[in-house]
Amino acid sequence: MKNAKSKSSSGGILEPVWCYHCCIRIAPSALRIVFHGKDYHRDCFVKLTSTSPKFGKN
């Protein structure tokens, strides 16, 4: 997992980032979590990990 602010291309122009769970745009100033190459709001990721057994503890 890593936290990032926004995706930027080589020109420095920010690209919109969409949450993989709720399909709502993640603001450039908001914290997001990238897990397995997919972007999530911090709260959406918590919901995913608490309800899904495949992301749970080993």
Image: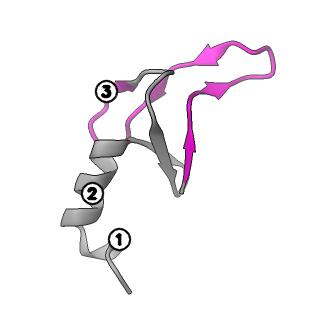
Residue positioned 31% across, 75% down in the render: 56
Query: What's under tag 1, amino acid-wise?
Result: Phe
Judged left or right of residue 18, residue 6 is right
Residue neighbourhood size for the residue with mark 1, other residues' Cα within 10 Å, grouped as few (<14), some (14–19), many (≥20): few
Q: Which residue is mark 3?
A: 24
Residue at horizontal 79%, vertical 14%? 11
Q: Secondary structure at mark 2?
A: helix
Type of the residue with mark 2: Leu
Queried whether the magenta region covers residue 21, the answer comes back as: yes
**In the rendered image of this protein, does residue 50 appear above or below residue 44?**
below
Q: Residue at x 26, y 37 (%)?
A: 22
For label 2, the residue is 48
The amino acid sitting under disc 3 is Ile
Q: Mark 2 or mark 1: which comes first in sequence?
A: 2
Closer to the chain start, of discs 3 and 2, is 3
Q: Secondary structure at mark 3?
A: loop
Please give the range of residues in magenta.
Answer: 2-25
